Image (spheres, rainbow, N blue to C red):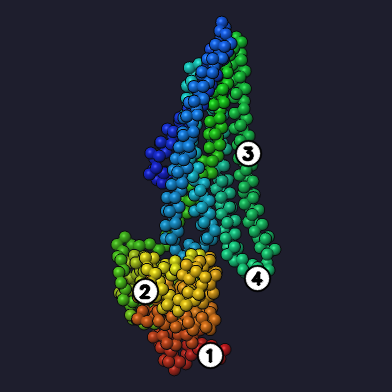
């Protein structure tokens, strides 16, 4: 029930809207309760009354029915409209707030979380599971109480007419309680299992949709169809387990529901024959049985719906409870404007507790405005080292200082504002070119965006696009070439204008023409900034202030290109091999 308590924190701001919806709902459900009383009056006081002419009875019947029709026609439509509108409005607002909270949570989770969890499963929690919780608001906090109030009102009215017959009507209620207790605890578990299986299908599907070019280029459609079938079959089995148990629940509950009216009809008929119960009272009782057991059926259905909602709540708050690897210290300060002096002091790092160290006791002093090139064989720790600077991960041992201050002593957001990053595969969103560049500075003017694009050698190709800067680039920038995507990403960093720059294999996957344009823009971008360049192609970093050669997480050599070439050590060997090849 902890999930319900936490969910109620999102419901609490809308408590008066819920109260208002319940009050309107009581009018909606209250009006039909007049019909059994009307039946009793029509049968006992009009139809079966002796000594009155057919015309008199007809006139009275028309008057009563006319009054009832007007009541229903005038009151029922607006009551129904506002009840539905406020119920859905409140549910939608709660979901809006919850998804807003979850998106904030998603942005705070570290890259370690995303390395270990599939995007599709995260999306399933935010979309599917959150949507399922809406039923808790509409069913659990509104309809449940309305149905319960309807049952109580009906029982009170029935008690006024005949106590014994009322007791017969409700004698099966304890069986309902037992059925709910027995069936719904397991149903909640089965619902959670089914939701997890659905999330796995969604995660698998999300990956395959993103990787469709690989599937089609490898001609492995049949193989992937089988892989998807396995995921889908697993979900089908969990869904059928849930369906089977749900069907057993309804079989028992509906049997009880069907038996109860039979008991009432039999006993009421006996009373009419032997104990003076009027025909009108019997008709009224039978009509009220329908009013009594319909809400009861809805309550049973509500129990199923609420079980599913609570299971979804469990999954949502399980996700919310995912711990942040990277957090601000309570006394963390803002990093206003960094000069760009960076020092790595005995830095060691491993991704998981039980894994090997990727970096080992690494120390490096970087002066303001220096360009540091990180080179070495794949797996040496180059990309890992630069990912520690913006605190995508925190060091396992040692410390990293920016302008003499441990980066863990400043707020994460203010630290990352000081750093611009250009990756090998720069990610663009499926928005316009203008919006993608503006990510570097969301409040930038159009003139600033154009200037940044010019600095990145991107303005000319952007101007030639069908809609210029308003051209949509497609998911992950699929409508642009690799070089064009990279130049848009560089323009983004120009706009951000950070004092520290990280370039991780920024030109390694481009053609010669694109590489020339991008290398030119990157050199312009790196001017007067502290820059870290991760590169495999050593010919692109000969201009660096210092080159740092990493092997197995340790610094092997440090120095300018000419100095390292004169040493004829590891760097010389790497450079010579690349030049020959």
Local packing at callout 2 (Cα closer than 10 Å; few below 14, some 14-19, many 20+) is some
Label annotation for residue 247: 3
Q: Is residue 286 above or below residue 453?
A: above
Q: Position of residue 89 (x, y in %)?
A: 45, 43
Label 1–label 2 contact, CB within 8 A: no
Q: Position of residue 26 (x, y in %)?
A: 45, 30
Q: Mark 2: which secondary structure?
A: loop
Local packing at callout 4 (Cα closer than 10 Å; few below 14, some 14-19, many 20+) is few
Please identify the quarter of the rendering in which residue 339 is found. Answer: bottom left
Query: First in sequence: mark 4 or mark 2?
Result: 4
Q: Position of residue 427 (x, y in %)?
A: 49, 69
Please identify the quarter of the rendering in which residue 255 is found. Answer: top right
Q: Residue furthest right?
A: 222
Q: Position of residue 37 (x, y in %)?
A: 51, 19
Q: Give the CA separation, mark 3 to mark 4.
A: 45 Å
Front-lying residue, 255 or 349: 255
Q: Give the CA separation, mark 4 to mark 2.
A: 40 Å
| Front position among marks 3 and 4 | 4
Query: First in sequence: mark 3 or mark 4?
Result: 4
Q: Is residue 206 above or below residue 75?
A: below
Q: For the point 56% across and 5% down, which residue is it?
A: 51
Q: Mark 4: which secondary structure?
A: helix
Q: For the point 46% across and 33% down, which residue is it?
A: 79
Label annotation for residue 579: 1
Q: For the point 58% across and 11% down, which residue is it?
A: 54
* Residue pointed to by mark 2: 497
Q: Quadrant of the C terminus?
A: bottom right
Q: Give the CA separation, mark 3 to mark 1.
A: 72 Å
Q: For the point 51% across and 48% down, which residue is it?
A: 131
């Amino acid at each position: 029930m902890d999930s319900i308590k936490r969910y109620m924190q999102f419901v609490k701001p809308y408590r008066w809207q819920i109260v208002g919806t319940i009050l309107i709902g009581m009018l909606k459900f209250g009006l039909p309760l007049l019909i059994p009383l009307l039946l009793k009056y029509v049968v006992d006081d009009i139809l079966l009354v002796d000594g009155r002419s057919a015309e008199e009875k007809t006139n009275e019947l028309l008057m009563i029915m006319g009054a009832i029709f007007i009541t229903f026609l005038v009151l029922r439509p607006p009551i129904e409209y506002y009840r539905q509108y406020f119920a859905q409005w409140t549910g939608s607002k709660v979901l809006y707030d919850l998804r807003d909270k979850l998106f904030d949570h998603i942005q705070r989770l570290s890259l370690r979380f995303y390395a270990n969890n599939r995007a599709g499963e995260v999306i399933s929690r935010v979309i599917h599971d959150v949507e399922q919780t809406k039923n808790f608001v509409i069913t659990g906090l509104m309809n449940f109480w309305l149905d319960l109030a309807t049952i109580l009102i009906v029982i009170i009215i029935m008690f006024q007419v005949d106590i014994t017959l009322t007791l017969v009507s409700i004698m099966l209620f304890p069986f309902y309680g037992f059925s709910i207790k027995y069936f719904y605890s397991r149903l909640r578990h089965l619902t959670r299992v089914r939701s997890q299986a659905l999330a796995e299908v969604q995660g698998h599907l999300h990956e395959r949709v993103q990787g469709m070019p690989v599937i089609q280029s490898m001609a492995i459609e049949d193989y992937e169809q089988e892989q998807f079938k396995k995921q889908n079959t697993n979900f089908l089995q969990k869904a059928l387990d849930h369906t089977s148990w749900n069907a057993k629940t309804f079989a028992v509950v509906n049997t009880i529901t069907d038996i109860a009216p039979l008991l009432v009809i039999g006993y009421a008929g006996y009373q009419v024959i032997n104990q003076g119960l009027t025909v009108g009272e019997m008709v009224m009782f039978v009509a009220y049985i329908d009013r009594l057991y319909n809400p009861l059926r809805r309550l049973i259905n509500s129990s199923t719906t609420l079980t599913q909602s609570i299971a979804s709540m469990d999954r949502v708050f399980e996700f919310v409870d995912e711990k942040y690897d990277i957090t601000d210290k309570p006394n963390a300060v803002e990093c206003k404007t960094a000069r760009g002096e960076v020092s790595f002091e005995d830095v060691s790092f491993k991704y998981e507790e039980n894994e090997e160290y990727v970096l080992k006791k690494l120390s490096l002093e970087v002066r303001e405005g220096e360009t540091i090139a990180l080179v070495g064989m794949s797996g040496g720790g180059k990309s890992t080292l630069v990912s520690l600077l913006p605190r995508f991960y925190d060091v396992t041992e040692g410390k990293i200082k920016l302008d003499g201050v441990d980066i863990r002593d400043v707020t994460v957001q203010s630290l990352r504002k000081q750093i611009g990053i250009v990756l090998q595969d720069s990610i663009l969103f499926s928005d316009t070119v203008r919006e993608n560049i503006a990510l570097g500075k969301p409040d930038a003017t159009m003139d600033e965006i154009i200037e940044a694009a010019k600095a990145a050698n991107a303005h000319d190709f952007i101007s030639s696009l069908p809609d210029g800067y308003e051209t949509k680039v497609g998911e992950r920038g699929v409508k642009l070439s690799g070089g064009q995507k990279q130049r848009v990403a560089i323009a983004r960093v120009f706009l951000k204008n950070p004092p520290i720059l990280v370039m991780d294999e920024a030109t390694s996957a481009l053609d010669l023409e694109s590489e020339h344009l991008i290398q030119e823009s990157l050199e312009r971008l790196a001017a007067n900034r502290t820059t870290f360049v991760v590169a495999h192609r050593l010919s692109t970093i000969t201009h660096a202030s210092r080159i740092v050669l990493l092997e197995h997480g340790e610094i092997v050599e440090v120095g300018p290109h000419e100095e390292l070439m004169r040493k004829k050590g590891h760097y010389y060997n790497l450079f010579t091999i690349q030049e020959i090849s």
